[in-house]
Image (cartoon, rainbow, N blue to C red):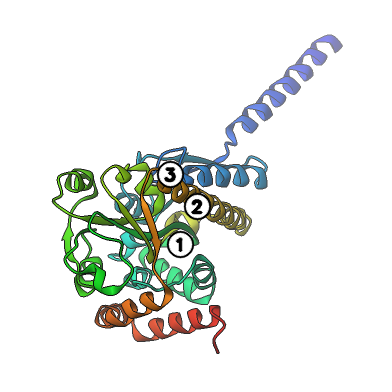
Amino acid sequence: MKLKQLVLTLGVALAAAAGGIAHAQDIKPRLIRFGYGLNEVSNQGRAAKLFAEEVEKASGGKMKVRAIGAAALGSDVQMQQALIGGAQEMMVGSTATLVGITKEMAIWDTPFLFNNAQEADAVLDGPVGQKVMDKLQEKGLVGLVYWENGFRNLTNNKRAVNKLEDFDGIKLRVMQNNVFIDSFKTLGANAVPLPFSELFTALETKTVDGQENPYNTILSSKFYEVQKYLTVTNHVYSPWIVTVSKKWWDQLSKDEQKVLMDAAVKSRDFERKDTRAEADKALAELKGKGMQINQLSPAEANRMREKLGAVNASIAANVGEDLWKDTQAAIAKARGGK
């Protein structure tokens, strides 16, 4: 009888243990899909990988980020809609593609807004950048941090652009974006909007004389094969932004939200350093490929700013005069002004 009772007790204990193991196996880590447009070996890919590692480490494996690149989850616009609908958790993409959702994002499209990356960092990471990012919450998105795409620079086959007048007569491919079209027309160029996929052929066949993009893109797209002059204009600083689905974010605990925010800040600092090092290397390579490189002077950049007064006024009216004034004040502060 005692043996029978012992076997029964042991059986109950084993069943309970098995049930506990099964329960533990049922507790799966929180899976987070993080989409981005470039490939794994890009600056986006490297920063996304670091973000994933930081989240897993800080959460003790309870949160796992699956970084999915090469636009496998869709374009920036498609991913933004997926986040708003709650079908995807996170992404990083261009602020320019958010303008249709949150008009204030257009502030970052302003030509010659920043003189250098340090000014951009100060404004984007400060109250103005946060104010713009906070507007996303009204539309179903939560912004965490800004990453860097980089400054856009000019290439062409006609002449080195040293002054405003040098734009005259240059057939310049621009993005299919009204701010860019209006800006370069105002500067005197013949602005030709074309999709990026058609650009190399257009340069090769001399349908257009030039184009504008960050160094990294100029190098990877081999524009040095069909372009002679590169002018360091830094005419637009392009940020990327890490965003989260608000529907999903609101379901997280405060601790989980902190894990993501802390990891995002680390990824931002890493990504900016990585992107800038890559850009410096790209510029040196472009010089080595035979491109003639010149730097636009601060005086000429100011002349162009003044020439673009009407374009800037249009942007100011679109984003709101208060935000425009706050942005200008933040830039003045970053430059050491009063």
Mark 3, residue position: 288
Mark 2 to mark 3: distance in Å? 13 Å
Residue at label 2?
280
Work out whether mark 1 precedes mark 2 in sequence or the reverse, and give the earlier one: 1
Q: Position of residue 261 (x, y in %)?
A: 58, 58
Q: Nearer the viewer, residue 257 or 37?
A: 37
Q: Real-space Cα distance between discs 1 and 3? A: 42 Å
Name the residue carrying label 1: 142
Looking at the picture, tell me which residue is in the foreground, 271 or 292: 292
Q: Which mark, by number, is residue 330?
A: none
Residue drawn 36% across the image and 76% down it: 300
At horizontal 73% and vertical 20% (from top left) the residue drawn is 14
* Relative image position of residue 208 (x, y in whole percent): 17, 54
Task: Classify residue 193 by image quadrant.
Answer: bottom left
Residue 308, given in percent of the width and then of the height, sits at: 28, 78
Q: Say what amino acid the circle numbered 3 marks.
A: Gly
